[in-house]
Amino acid sequence: MRAARVHRFGEPLVVEEAPEPIPGPGEVLVEVAYAGVNPLDLWVTRGTVAGGSQPLPFVPGAEAVGRVEGRWVVVRGAGVGVTRQGLYAERAAAPAEAVVDLPAGVDPVQAAAAPIAGGTAWALAHRVAEITPEDRALVLGAAGGVGSLLLQVLRNAGVRAWGQTGDPAKAAFVEEQGAERALVVGAEDLAGAVAELRPTVVFDPLGDGYTAAALEALGPYGRLALFGVSAGATEELDLRALYRKAIRVLTYSGTIEPVERLREATQAVLAEIAAGRLRVPVDEVLPLERAAEAHRRLEERRVRGKLVLEVTAA
């Protein structure tokens, strides 16, 4: 079968013939149609996830849509594409607990792009930050996969939300996803730019520089929800900004979420898509042969929303 694999951490993906997977106890064989592309996949190929313990060559891909014995399913969780061989392949062996049925009427491309970004957005809003209609939210990195869906989740919950991006060309896109206002600012100007909103919660996937600015922007009893460090993994913080305003620092990592919670989030997002309340902004659907290009585009931040790989014809 064809698969996109990394042979050495840090090197580009190679699409090549790979051994057929053999499902073990409690596993099913998935005929993969579409696989979502995520920063997590890129980090896995760099060896920065799970301590680089994955067996090489390794197939990334932590979310996909395909068929199991003829029925359409969505796959996410239980280590697929993270600690066990993933879904950038024509066929994959996946634990049955990582598989949920695709709701009738949901576009497979939408479903392939939804579990990680959509599930993260849903968990951040409803379980981590516990948002209410009284909240005023600032979403950093709002043009990304999670950010664009988080804006939609917040809008559907009746929350005022502004979205930050560093790219003026993405401002209109951010507002299309539900932001009341798009802010084209860097970390140094963030606190001043958001003063009018007076956010009660900031969702931060960026880290370096932005986290300190988010703490400055938050008012008393605000919440900072940190779920990534794409701008940098280190930060110097004025701890007085934390305790003097009684800021609550909340965090989320899908890589350690129990599979039951991932299933719950995936099913919630698929239900929202089926009902027409949520739509994943898919930038482009690329053939599996262009998997390395998809990773380069992620790294260079040349993506609005999500990229999807077409693995086999649906």
Image: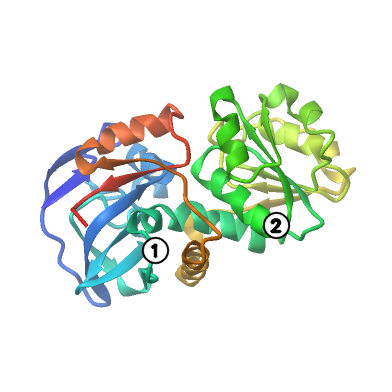
Whether residue 152 is situated above or below residue 92 in the rendered picture: above
Q: Dot 1 lies on which element?
A: loop
Question: In percent of the image, x 18 and y 55: which residue is there?
Answer: 90
Tell me whether the residue at label 1 lies in contact with that at label 2, contact meaning CB atoms closer than 8 angstroms: no
Name the foreground residue: 153 vs 68: 153
| Left or right placement of residue 121 versus residue 203 in this view | left
Q: Earlier in the sequence, mark 1 or mark 2?
A: 1
Residue beneath the point at 29% across and 45% down: 309
**Amino acid tagged 1:** Val
Residue placed most toward the observer, 300 or 285: 285
Q: Residue 129: give its label.
A: 2
Residue 305 left/right relative to 202: left
Identify which amino acid the numbered label 2 is placed on.
Ala
Q: Position of residue 214 (x, y in %)?
A: 74, 37
Badge 1: few (under 14), some or many (20 or more) residues near its Cα, within 10 Å? Answer: some
37 sits to left or right of 11: right
Give percent across and percent down for residue 302: 43, 29
Q: Which residue is mark 1?
A: 106
- Residue 83 placed where, x, y %? 34, 55
Residue positioned 39% across, 71% down in the render: 103
